Image (tube, rainbow, N blue to C red):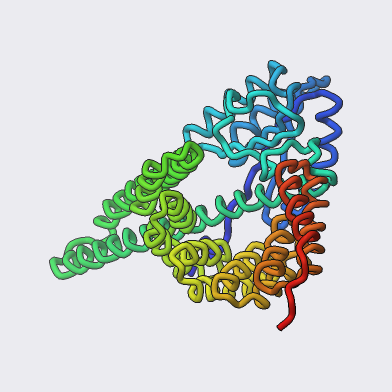
Amino acid sequence: MSLLLTSTRTIKLFFAHSNSRDDKKLREKLEPHLSSLEPLRVIINWYKSQTLTGRDWKQESYQHLNTSQLIVLLVSPDFLAADDCKNITRWAMKRHNAGQAYVIPVKLRPIDNWQATPFGHLQCLPYNGEPITSRFWPRQDDAFVNIVEKIREEVEKIQEDQRQLQLIQEQQKSEIFASIDRFISKHSLNRIIRGTNVPTFSVGIAASIIVIAVLLGFCNFSLERQVNNLLTQGQNKLGKRDYQGASENYTEVLKIAPKNINAYIKRGEARYSPKDYKAAIKDYTQAIQIAPKNVNAYIKRGQNRHFLKDYQAAIKDYNQAIQIAPKNVNAYRKRGDAQYYLKKYQAAIDDYTKAIRLSPDSADIYKSRGLVYENNLQNKQEAIKSYQKAATLYKKQGATDKYKKIIYKIQKLQQRKPQPSN
């Protein structure tokens, strides 16, 4: 395998934000977290509107905007009101819709009528859609970590797409040059047999090779652009819950690039939502065959197997995910869910406890552990402890409805009389 297949090009990441003092402070807090992206060969550029003597920062910012694969919009009321930011948003969304870049909106501060913004249909960060400054994020560093994790996922997807396209291009080059080699060998041999001057004839062959090489380069560029465009269209349709349309886009990608892992995983997501679990499992299986260490594919396949009530197979997938990534919280949590349905209640408790150790602020996992203690192990005290921890976290995160429900559950449990012993 050539070096081309194992290397990826540098990923350019562009951040746009308003010049308000509040937004600049949040940008400064985010910036140190981005250092973890450096090993992935990511170049980060920030929007600068001011023009200094001898240097047009604004023009340079637009040059970066036009050449970046990922565009992150740090959105606030000031961002939406600023003319410069409106222009950046308009151009960024144009590139996004054309499949030339991927836009990621980030909520810095509360926004009224988010869905009415030009990017309102896109999945925003942090993951819960709550602004960084909301009560949901008592520690803003947690929000910044979540943002960088999601950006890293998108960077890795782009790099994987690059590798798959490079693989296809290498295969195409090998086939074409093999054909050229056969062409040269055949005609050179014929010329030798006929006594024709071979070097003279080679000029024509060389010209043919140059033409083929030019056409090959154009073909490679066209394929890459077409794949990126289809992937972006599919993502947009997923955001709008057009699962059939998204699935069709990813199918078109796979016709061009049969080993595109991202297309298999995304098509699996499109099939999962309308509950076509078997088809989704096939897609994740294909992704795993191409990339046996793709943790995301194992977890998603396990999730679909869970919904088909094949809990043993689901656990096998979660085991594989944990073997590859021993600190993956989601794998432990979902394995705990599968253990519960197999009535392996202590095993479920053990998995929930491992997930909590890795992510101590996960209120929902505390709640799940409390339910097993209460309903299946009849351990009232441990159930109350888990519920109380969940309640504390729900309150800190501003999840009022969940907080009220868990408090009511604690009160009912405390009032419950002990079961008579036999």
Q: Would you say residue 213 is visible in this rendering?
A: no
Above or below 97: residue 280: below
Could you tell me residue 406's position as x and y percent? 74, 52
Above or below 177: residue 396: above
Of all residues, the one furthest to the bottom in this rendering is: 422
Above or below 332: residue 157: above
Q: Quadrant of residue 258?
A: bottom left
Q: Would you say residue 313 is visible in this rendering?
A: yes
> Who is closer to the viewer here, 179 or 305?
305
> Who is closer to the viewer here, 200 or 18?
18
> Who is closer to the viewer here, 139 or 402?
402
Could you tell me residue 347's position as x and y percent? 65, 77
Residue found at x 59% / y 32%: 66
Query: Along the horizontal axis of the image, is 24 left or right of 187?
Result: right
Residue found at x 71% / y 47%: 402
Query: Along the horizontal axis of the image, is 355 left or right of 168?
Result: right
Give the quadrant of the C terminus: bottom right
Query: Along the horizontal axis of the image, is 74 left or right of 200?
Result: right
Could you tell me residue 385's position as x and y percent? 82, 63
Query: Along the horizontal axis of the image, is 18 left or right of 119?
Result: right
Question: Disc count in the image?
Answer: 0
